[in-house]
Image: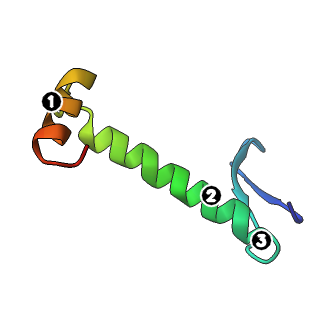
Amino acid sequence: MGHLQYLVDESGQKAAVVIPIKGNEAALEEFIEDIYGHEMIDLRKDEETLSAKELFEGLSKDGLL
């Protein structure tokens, strides 16, 4: 990673980091994908789940297996 800059709060504690885009495109893209993935998990946490058996039965019924 290139030169990082830290933003500090009133007491001098690191509060944020500035990451240069140039030279870090791949790492930043992966980071954004991770954040998106975690957001999707959080949004779907209350959805009904299926057992593996139910999943495979449904896929077979729909002709996808």
In the image, residue 56 above or below residue 8:
above
Q: Residue at x 19, y 27 (%)?
A: 50
Q: Nearer the viewer, residue 51 or 33?
A: 51
Find numbered disc 3 in the image and state the secondary structure of the residue it sits on.
loop
Secondary structure at numbered mark 2:
helix
Q: Which residue is mark 1?
A: 48
Question: Which numbered disc, 3 or 1, marks the residue that appears first in the sequence?
Answer: 3
Q: Foreground mark, 3 or 2?
A: 2
Q: Quadrant of the C terminus?
A: top left
Gap between marks 3 and 2, in whole Å? 15 Å
Q: Earlier in the sequence, mark 3 or mark 2?
A: 3
Specify the amino acid type for callout 1: Glu
Furthest residue to the right? 3
Place of residue 35 in the rendered image (x, y in percent of width and height, measured from the top left)? 50, 51
Q: Residues within 10 Å of mark 1 (few under 14, many from 20)?
A: few
Along the line of sight, the residue nearer the viewer: 65 or 20: 65
Residue 57 location, x and y as percent? 16, 31
Residue 6 position within the rendered picture, expressed as x and y whole percent measured from the top left: 78, 56
Q: Is residue 3 left or right of residue 16?
A: right
Label 3 environment density (alpha carbons within 10 Å; few <14, some 14–19, many ≥20): some
Mark drawn on residue 39 = none
For residue 47, which quarter of the picture? top left
Instruction: Give the answer, above or below, for where 32 lies relative to 49.
Output: below
Q: Is residue 3 left or right of residue 39?
A: right
Q: CA distance from mark 3 to mark 1?
A: 41 Å
**Residue 51 in sight here:** no
Between the C-alphas of marks 2 and 1, the distance is: 28 Å
- Residue 23 visible somewhere in the drawing: yes
The residue singled out by tag 3 in the image is: 20
Residue that carries the numbered disc 2 in the rendered image: 30
